[in-house]
Image (cartoon, rainbow, N blue to C red):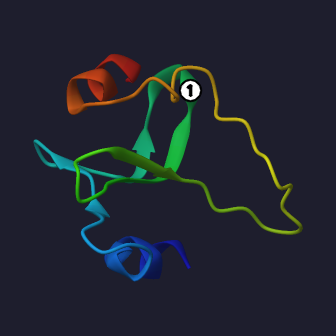
């Protein structure tokens, strides 16, 4: 599921694509002490999008790990790792 979704993020939203920077992509992105993010992308306005895939029944509200909520640019992403 992750591979399929990451290869075509536009199926979720037009203009969304997988994060790419200096040979690093957004699939299983290492965000340092926050941990690994399943999929890290950007939307058509260049906003950061984090997608976490879960098995089983999901809760309606899942809090983001500390440090992820303030990510607004690739510079901020580099500070996470």
Image location of residue 34, percent across then percent down: 56, 26
Q: Please report the residue visible at 51 percent of the width from the left and 72 percent of the height from the top.
A: 2
Tell which residue pokes out farthest to the front in this image.
45
**What x and y, as percent, mark residue 40?**
40, 51
**Quadrant containing the C terminus in the rendered view:** top left
Residue 27's place in the image compared with 77, above or below, is below
Q: Under tag 1, what secondary structure?
A: helix
**Left/right of residue 48 with respect to residue 25 in the rendered view:** right
Q: How many marks?
A: 1
Asked if residue 74 lies left or right of residue 77, the reply is: left
Asked which quadrant contains residue 11, the reply is bottom left
Give the farthest residue toward the left: 22
Q: Quadrant of residue 77?
A: top left
Please name the residue that numbered disc 1 is placed on: 34
Residue at 76% x, 44% y is 62
Question: Is residue 79 depicted above or below 29 in this figure?
Answer: above
Q: Residue at point 26% right, 52% down?
A: 19
Quadrant housing the N terminus:
bottom right
- Residue extending furthest top? 79
In this view of the protein, which residue sits in the foreground, 46 or 24? 46
* Label 1 crowd bin: few (<14), some (14–19), many (20+), radius 10 Å: some
Q: Quadrant of residue 17?
A: bottom left
Q: Residue at x 78, y 67 (%)?
A: 55
């Amino acid at each position: 599921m992750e591979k399929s979704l990451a290869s075509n993020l536009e199926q979720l939203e037009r203009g969304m694509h997988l994060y790419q920077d200096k040979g690093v992509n957004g699939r299983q992105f290492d965000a340092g002490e926050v941990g690994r993010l399943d999929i890290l992308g950007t939307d058509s306005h260049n906003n950061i999008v984090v997608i976490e895939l879960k098995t089983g029944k999901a809760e309606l509200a899942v809090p983001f790990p500390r440090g992820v909520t303030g990510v607004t640019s690739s510079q901020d992403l580099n500070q996470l790792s």
